[in-house]
Image: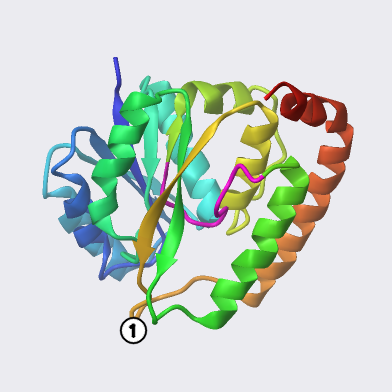
Amino acid sequence: MTKRLFLIPNYNHPDTIGSVVQSCLPHEGDILIVDDGSNAQTKEKIAKAALLSKRVIVLTLPVNSGKGGAVLAGFQWAIDRQYTHVFQLDADGQQDAAAISEFLDSSNKHPQALVCGYPIYDESVPLSRKWGRLITDFWVMINTLSRAYRDCLCGFRIYPMDSVVRWLSTNPTIGKRMDFDCDILVQLYWQGIDCINLPVKIAYPADGISHFRPIENWYLSKMHARNFFGMLVRLPTLLGRHFHA
């Protein structure tokens, strides 16, 4: 039996959190907002969003732990309560909520697979973001020896929690900031997970809030280097997976 949780990590996105929660409410499943050490204005908006339904729960972290830290906290909360699938969405409202239904249908048909979004941009996308993603996607292709993922930074995806539990049992080294979304995909691939890639429209509003800082490029570079050596250690297994595919 499927027990689904929508997971929304939120750090200082006060103006969009309500609309993101509302986009989840028509669908079956509880909604967990992880307040990642947000400011007072955001906490007020989170509290209002929690009043939209009894299905909305707030998990408050005392200090900002980074996107990865917030998602991991949400994962553990979900595992403790025996949720079978976690649908991760970003709190910034850039992802098209109309895609939720297609992702849920795919997950229901393939419950053991990771359902991962890849972005369809409009003219608002900053070129630095668009080209920077291509570099990261290239390194993910190298570190998995595959084209399993169309995009590795889009935080719009459904995780089967049994795979996450097995991965966590290995005590993995994992990025806790913006590098998390990419890092976990590589490591889940090493664990043998299959991925279904689906499109999701992305819009960047002119007044939108971005928490991507130049230091994130350093974290991404460290993560790619670490995973490259991890790939070398797993080379026979990865090659064998492709040989038997």
Task: Identify the image quadrant of the N terminus.
Answer: top left
The residue that appears at 23% across and 33% down in the rendered structure is: 29
Disc 1 residue type?
Answer: Asp
Up/down of 44 relative to 123, above or below: above
* Residue that sits furthest to the top in the current view: 1
User: Local crowd at mark 1 within 10 Å, few (<14), some, or many (≥20)?
Assistant: few
The residue that appears at 13% across and 38% down in the rendered structure is: 54
Q: Would residue 26 be found to the left or right of residue 215 on screen?
A: left
Give x and y (percent) for residue 94: 34, 66
Q: What stretch is highlighted in magenta?
A: 147-157
Give x and y (percent) for residue 114: 48, 34
Q: Would residue 113 be found to the left or right of residue 201 on screen?
A: right
Q: Would residue 191 be found to the left or right of residue 221 on screen?
A: left
**Which residue is denoted by mark 1 in the rendering?**
207
Task: Identify the image quadrant of the C terminus.
Answer: top right
* Residue 21 visible in this rendered orientation of the protein: yes
The secondary structure that dominates the magenta segment is: loop
Question: Is 152 part of what is drawn in magenta?
Answer: yes
Give x and y (percent) for residue 243: 77, 25
Residue 108, quarter of picture: top left
For this rendering, which residue is in front, 63 or 75?
Answer: 75
Question: Is 86 part of what is drawn in magenta?
Answer: no
Looking at the rendered structure, the secondary structure element under dot 1 is loop
